[in-house]
Amino acid sequence: MIALREYQTECLSAITDAKSKGIHKPLVCLPTASGKTVIFTSLAKQVNCPTLILAHRDELIEQAIDKLLMIWPEADCGVVKAERNEMNHQVIIASVQTLSRKRRLHDLSKDIGLIITDESHHAIANSYQRIYDHLGIHSGQLHLGVTATPNRMDKIGLGNVFQKVVYEKNILDMIRMGYLCDLQCKQIRTQIDISKVRSRGGDYDIHGLSPLINTENANELIVESWLTHANTRRTLAFTVDVAHTHALTSSFRDQGIGAEAVWGAMPVDKRHSVLKDFADGNIQVIVNCAVLTEGYDNPQIDCILMARPTKSTSLYIQAIGRGTRIFPGKKDCLILDVACISDKHDLISFAKLFQLKESPNAGETLTDAVNRMTRPVVGYGTKPVPESIDLFERSRLVWISLPNGFRLSLGTHGNISVYAAQANNKYHVFHWDRQESTCITTKPVDISWALGIAESHAREVTDGRLALVLKSASWRKQLMTDKQRQIMQRYRIPFTEMTTKGEASTRISEQFAKSPQRVHV
């Protein structure tokens, strides 16, 4: 079983609340690596009705199967793709390309209560529309769309399929919460002028872009820049077209760098072999063209090479999302961004994506750059700033405010503490267990990031059993216990006969947060 993260639980509640208000076609927008598959498979278990999960890549189908059976081991699950036509199951996970064919659709029951469209920014396509038209629309049906990129290059809105975004977090939100790794960016400046390249489908026309980008000099410059800034990093490169993929791969190899190309028409078994070698560390660089933007998960990737200029926010987000997963020993992910001469309003860049006033400084992470450019300078003090207090008060968990931070008491599991560091508005996270204190953070971090790390660690050490510290836990409304009464009397903590367990627990925790002594209640 998987213990849901707080925001995943919030997301499921948002979907349920929206349905109760008549929103039967909600859209959820969460970045790559934030557990969208966990959310929608949890929804399938929760709703427990005839369900159809639509995906457009084999990798996404396999992920959905794996997560569904982890969340809901007893689920009656069937797969529709290629030669498999397992329609007579409660939960059907289907390839859009396969299911949209007439003879397959003929076998699909219209009695589907829950439709889930993964990577739903594709939902406008005719293949999806044929499936939706076949199923029709009825009042009891719920159609959930999940995507990391709600914006489409062709500017056709998803409002034709979905009613409203009911839950959303962006990459920066998830980095600050501690669920994605931080990002750095380094521009590879060129004199390539792409300002006259025409657009097609909302992005640069490939046939006009390729001759300008795929040159010997440009590819050599890319490799030289990689050698300077990323030669120890596991790298995934995105190129303009197949010819560029092979040319850039050759440029890497000419420098003695282990690199392989991946493209759409590549035999599947060969692709799997290359990706396995990459995962095993036998290859340092994978160069791909429009293949590994969705459904490919390798958390070891710590460099994304954007060798393909783009006007598409969606494509850029999908590409850098391949490097945002957390992995032991991975500090951040470096985005190497090829900068061309272009209309600044069209070309997507790292700074534009995150709405930065300027490009980050050398070695500066995204969160550091955002803090420097958006947050007023605050003098260091021992007390948390009001922003910090508000953040912890809004948490679903019972945090105790300290003179220099916050504490979450976990009973027999010790406590999690967030302390202000000797830096402007930065914090460290500690786990105290019995007589040992362990610092969880390797460096001081933003308060929202510290909160995310702290609560994630609390779930980990308690195996997800956080009823002790949930503000909404039913036990907190019961009258205090005799043991709590005795402790409060002994330490002269105010109480009345109507004091609840929750109130007593909080007051006792506040009392002993001021003392080196620890008491488990």
Image (tube, rainbow, N blue to C red):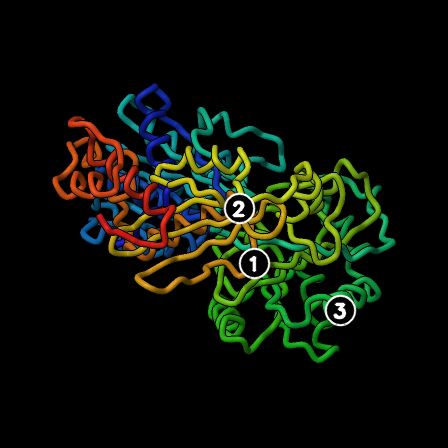
* Residue that badge 2 annotates: 176
Whether 276 is drawn above or below 507: the answer is below
Between the residue at mark 2 and the residue at mark 3, the CA separation in whole angstroms equals: 29 Å
Q: Describe residue 168's horizontal placement relative to residue 304 as left or right.
A: left
Q: Quadrant of residue 220?
A: bottom right
Question: What residue appears at the point 49 percent right and 50 percent down from the top-left corner?
Answer: 419
Q: Is residue 29 visible?
A: yes
Q: Earlier in the sequence, mark 1 or mark 2?
A: 2
Question: What residue appears at the point 17 percent right and 38 percent down from the top-left corner?
Answer: 485
Q: What secondary structure is found at the residue carrying circle 2?
A: helix
Question: What residue appears at the point 62 percent right and 44 percent down from the top-left corner?
Answer: 380
Quarter of the figure that contains the N terminus: bottom left
Going by the numbered disc 3, the residue's amino acid type is Thr
* Residue that badge 3 annotates: 228
Residue 443: image tag = 1
Whether 18 is drawn above or below 369: the answer is above
Between the residue at mark 1 and the residue at mark 2, the CA separation in whole angstroms equals: 13 Å
Q: What secondary structure is found at the residue carrying circle 3?
A: helix
- Residue 171 on image: x %, y %: 55, 45
Q: Describe residue 403's horizontal placement relative to residue 154 as left or right.
A: left
Q: Is residue 107 visible?
A: no
Question: What residue appears at the point 42 percent right and 43 percent down from the top-left corner?
Answer: 118
Q: Nearer the viewer, residue 270 or 192?
A: 192
Whether 121 is drawn above or below 240: the answer is above
Of labels 1 and 2, the one closer to you: 1
